[in-house]
Structures are given as C-alpha cells and as structure tokens.
C-alpha cells in the first residue's frame, strides 16, 4: 500500500476497542459525527482568529513563533491526556508503550509537512479571506479519496459522487464569470493550491499512521508534536538570521489576547483532527472544511468585504448539500466488497434451497440436509425458523 504498506483497520475492530472506553455509549457513527462537529467549531474559530489578528494586512507577532507556541501547547495537551490514561490503567500500560523506530520516522516526516503548512496559512490569509481559503481547501477530499484508493481503502459510489460534486461546486464559487477568471490573484491560488495539496497528503498519511500502529492516539500526537516543536523553533531561529527578510520581532513580542487565543485554538484543532482520524477518516476531516466554509463565507461577506454573487451562494448550497449527503447517507453505507456474514449465509441457504428444488424434493427439507445446523441463529429466532423461510 501507500506510505509503507499500512493496512487500514476495519470498523468492527475499532468498535471492539472503543467498547471499553469512556465514550462507549455512542455508536461508531455517533463518534464520527461528534468528532466532525467538534472539529468544525474549533476550526471555524481558529480561521476567524487568523484574520482578526491582522493589523494593516500583517501580524504584530512573529508567525514562526506562533507556530512554535502552538506546537508546544499541542504537546502539553497530548502528553497530559496520555499521562492521565496511563495513570488510570493501574500499571497495565507504559508511557512509551508500542513506540518503534518506524513510527518515529513517520511522525518526523509528518511534523515537517505540518509545520510548513501552518506557516503557509499565515501567508495565504495575507492575500485571501478565510472563506476563500476554506473553499480552496475543500478540494482536499478529492485528493484524499485518490490517495486512500491507492492505499487500498475503497469508497462507495455515492461517496465518490459527493466528493466530485463538491469539487465542481467549489469551482463555481471561485470563478468570476464577469472577469472570466478567478476572484483572486493567481499568486493567491498558487499558495492555496500548495496548502491544499499538503493538507491532503498529511491527512491521509496521518490517518494511515494512527490506524496502522497499535499505539495510543494521544501518545502518537505527543510524539508528532515533540518533533513539531523542535522544527518550528528551528524555523523561527532561521527567520531571525534571514539576510533578505530578517525577523525583527522577539519570540513573545506582539502577542495580544486575540493572538493568544489563536495559539490555543490551533492547539485544540490539532487534537480534534487526530480524533477525527481515529473514529472516521481523512475525507471526513476535509469535509469538515466545507461546513467551516459556510460559516466563514457569510462572515467574510459581512465583515471582510468578500465579493459574492448568485453563483457563489448556489455553489455554497451545493457544497453543504453534498456534505450533508456524505455525513448522513454515504458514510453509513457498507464499503464496496464488504459483505456481512448474515448476507453470505443467506446467499448460501438460497443456493442450497435451489439445489433442493432442482432435485425434485420438498422445500421443507431437514436442517441437516440444508446445512443450517452449522449456522448460528439470530437472537430471538426459533429453531428451524431459517429453513422455513428458505
């Protein structure tokens, strides 16, 4: 498979692991929806804070130091939650249980890409509004679907339809029919395209790592944020000695209460994304961007002078409709080729019944002749009930 041959775990295995957890009262679908909604709220707040922190088109603090502080906060959050889980296990689990050289290498690469992408967010929002950035990143589900297909995870037909329709709707929103071009400068679209590609790659890569290793999610997060902290601090030090555009601001200089809230919500965002990967997948995480977009486009049109037209709002409606369809219909449908045991047994019984009829025998043949004695009956069913139905 892709990226080291990770084997995606099946939902049935994950349901068994979740059964003993604190959230075991929720179904797997309930956990997927809950993690989706939490991510939407946190990401919407963080994206707005990015724009609100700007003063005259720039930031009063160093973006590189903000990324480093965010990684530090993520590390503290993830390590604290993992420590709580280990302490509550009664000595059954060790703090670094399951860590290997391979998983360390995976998270080192992920940390580099995440740090670059976090820095890109500052640059993008200097030339684009939050709604447009979220619209651009809504293309990530299609890229994620392609990468997941290469890794061995199959999507259903309705899931593919939702992803493709969403991408077309985003193109409608971003195309200005009067100018015959996009509503932003080409430079902005280059930055958004780069950020979207990195988002798709890191989304799928992180999902495969979380589901491909038997290591607690909070420990995996702590490992990645450790690397992220070191890399982000190195980026800041490099910016201080950059001869072309040296960073003049100190590490903690220029932080207002809005800037501190931005750091905090970015940290919450990282933890929320990890739980979406755990309970759902990278496509659900990127579909959350679509819901964020609905909020941010309305806010951008009202407060940041974003130009909108009928095409824009129709495209937004289509994006929201496909998000609803994916989260409420498509995601509930069984994966292609995943035939449940009752369906397999039922098919075998029907074939056996056809063989009985072809031999001229009665439909009410004994269970021994039909092989029903080997089948576990469902709770509440009466002995021999299955044979009568055949």
Image (cartoon, rainbow, N blue to C red):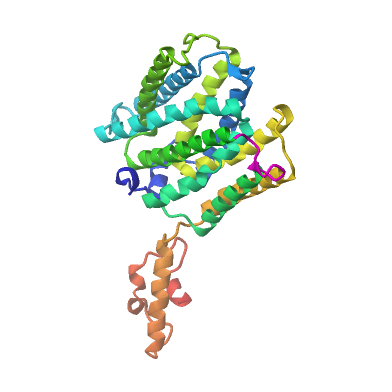
Q: Report the quarter where the C terminus lies.
A: bottom left
- Whole-percent x and y of residue 65? 47, 16
* Residue at 46% across, 40% down: 200
Q: Is residue 24 above or below residue 72?
A: below
* Residue at 65% across, 33% down: 296
Q: Is residue 106 above or below residue 56?
A: below
Left or right, 192 with reference to 377? right
Query: Camera-side residue: 243 or 99?
Result: 243
Give the quarter of the image for residue 105. Answer: top left
Q: Which residues are magenta?
A: 174-185
- Whole-percent x and y of residue 318? 65, 49
Q: Is residue 255 above or below residue 225?
A: above
Q: Judge whether residue 98 is colored magenta.
A: no
- Whole-percent x and y of residue 196? 50, 38
Give the quarter of the image for residue 61. Answer: top right
- For this orientation, the residue located farthest to the left is 101
Query: Camera-side residue: 369 or 283?
Result: 283
- Whole-percent x and y of residue 232? 41, 21
Say whether residue 33 is visible: no
């Amino acid at each position: 498979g892709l990226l080291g041959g990770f084997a995606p775990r099946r939902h049935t295995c994950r349901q068994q692991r979740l059964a003993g957890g604190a959230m075991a009262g929720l179904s797997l679908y309930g956990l997927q929806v809950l993690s989706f909604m939490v991510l939407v709220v946190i990401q919407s707040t963080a994206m707005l804070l990015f724009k609100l922190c700007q003063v005259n088109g720039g930031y009063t603090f160093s973006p590189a130091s903000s990324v480093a502080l965010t990684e530090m906060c993520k590390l503290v959050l993830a390590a604290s939650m993992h420590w709580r889980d280990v302490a509550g296990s009664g000595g059954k689990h060790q703090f670094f249980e399951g860590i290997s050289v391979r998983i360390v290498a995976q998270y080192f690469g992920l940390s580099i890409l995440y740090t670059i992408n976090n820095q890109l967010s500052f640059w993008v929002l200097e030339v684009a509004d939050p709604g447009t950035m979220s619209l651009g990143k809504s293309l990530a589900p299609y890229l994620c679907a392609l990468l997941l297909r290469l890794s061995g995870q199959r999507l259903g037909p309705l899931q593919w339809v939702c992803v493709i329709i969403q991408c077309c709707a985003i193109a409608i929103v971003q195309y200005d029919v009067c100018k015959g071009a996009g509503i932003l400068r080409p430079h902005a679209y280059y930055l958004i395209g780069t950020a979207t590609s990195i988002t798709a790659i890191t989304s799928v890569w992180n999902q495969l790592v979380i589901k491909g290793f038997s290591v607690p999610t909070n420990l995996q997060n702590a490992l990645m944020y450790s690397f992220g902290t070191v890399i982000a601090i190195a980026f800041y030090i490099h910016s201080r000695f950059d001869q072309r555009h040296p960073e003049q601001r100190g590490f903690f200089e220029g932080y207002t209460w809005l800037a501190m809230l931005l750091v905090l919500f970015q940290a919450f965002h990282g933890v929320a994304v990890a739980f979406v990967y755990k309970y759902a997948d990278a496509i659900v995480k990127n579909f959350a961007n679509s819901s964020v977009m609905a909020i941010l486009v309305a806010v951008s049109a009202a407060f940041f002078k974003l130009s909108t037209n009928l095409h824009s709002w129709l495209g937004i409606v289509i994006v929201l409709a496909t998000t609803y369809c994916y989260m409420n219909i498509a995601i509930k449908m069984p994966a292609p080729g995943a035939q449940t045991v009752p369906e397999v047994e039922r098919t075998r019984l029907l074939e056996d019944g056809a063989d009985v009829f072809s031999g001229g025998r009665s439909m009410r043949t004994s269970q021994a002749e039909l092989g029903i004695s080997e089948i576990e009956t469902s709770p509440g069913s009466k002995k021999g009930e299955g044979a009568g139905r055949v």
